[in-house]
Image (tube, rainbow, N blue to C red):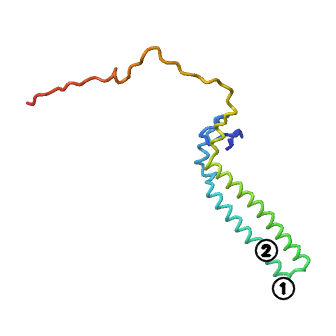
Amino acid sequence: MTCPTCGARLKRALSYCNHCGANLSALKLDPEYGSPETTTDTLVWVIIGTTITLLGMALGGMVLIKNGSIPEGLGSAFVGLSFAALVLVESVLLWRLLRVNKAARQSRYPDEAEDFKTAELGESSPHVLEAPAESVSSVTEQTTRTLKASYKERE
């Protein structure tokens, strides 16, 4: 995860950025960013719509060539450009879809092991706890008391 304010790489999903202090929890609730599922659905529908439109344009160009409405050279160029646009636009949309899915997967299952690398820690010697000088009494021994029953006479 990266902070959208300062661009710092964060090891896990946090509420605030460690570097600049930006509120990151507001981004999760902001409808402008949308949920990954909504973004994925939108991209899939854009891919479907673009495919239908560009294939329809190419098919329309072929029909116009067959009817003789446009010259064959111009029609062939139109159909070729339609297919080239189809390949280019679809590849960009599929690349974007894969990036959104990867980001959604990382936000759902952050790599927690990355936060606990021991390479960052220096060498340390093992510490041994020393025995207390005096025996320590239990807290309950000092706070518990025996309650005596008190009786109230009824009138």
Image point 61% across, 24% down: which residue?
A: 126
Disc 2 to disc 1, how far (Cα)?
15 Å
Q: Residue furthest right?
A: 73
In the rendered view, tell whether residue 31 sits above or below residue 69.
above
Q: Are marks 2 and 1 in contact (CB under 8 Å)?
A: no
Labels 2 and 1: the sequence-earlier one: 2
Find numbered disc 2 in the image and state the secondary structure of the residue it sits on. helix
Quadrant including the C terminus: top left
Disc marking residue 57 = 2
Percent across and percent down for residue 85 are 81, 66
Residue under pointer 1 = 67
Q: Residue furthest left?
A: 155
Image point 59% across, 43% down: which residue?
A: 25
Rendered image quadrant of residue 100:
bottom right
Q: Is residue 152 left or right of residue 48?
A: left
Percent across and percent down for residue 118 are 67, 34
Image point 38% across, 23% down: which residue?
A: 139
Q: What's the amino acid at mark 1? A: Asn
Q: What's the amino acid at mark 2? A: Met
Q: What is the tally of numbered marks visible in this picture?
A: 2
- Local packing at callout 1 (Cα closer than 10 Å; few below 14, some 14-19, many 20+) is few
Image point 14% across, 27% down: which residue?
A: 151
In the rendered view, tell whether residue 155 sits above or below residue 91.
above
Quadrant including the N terminus: top right
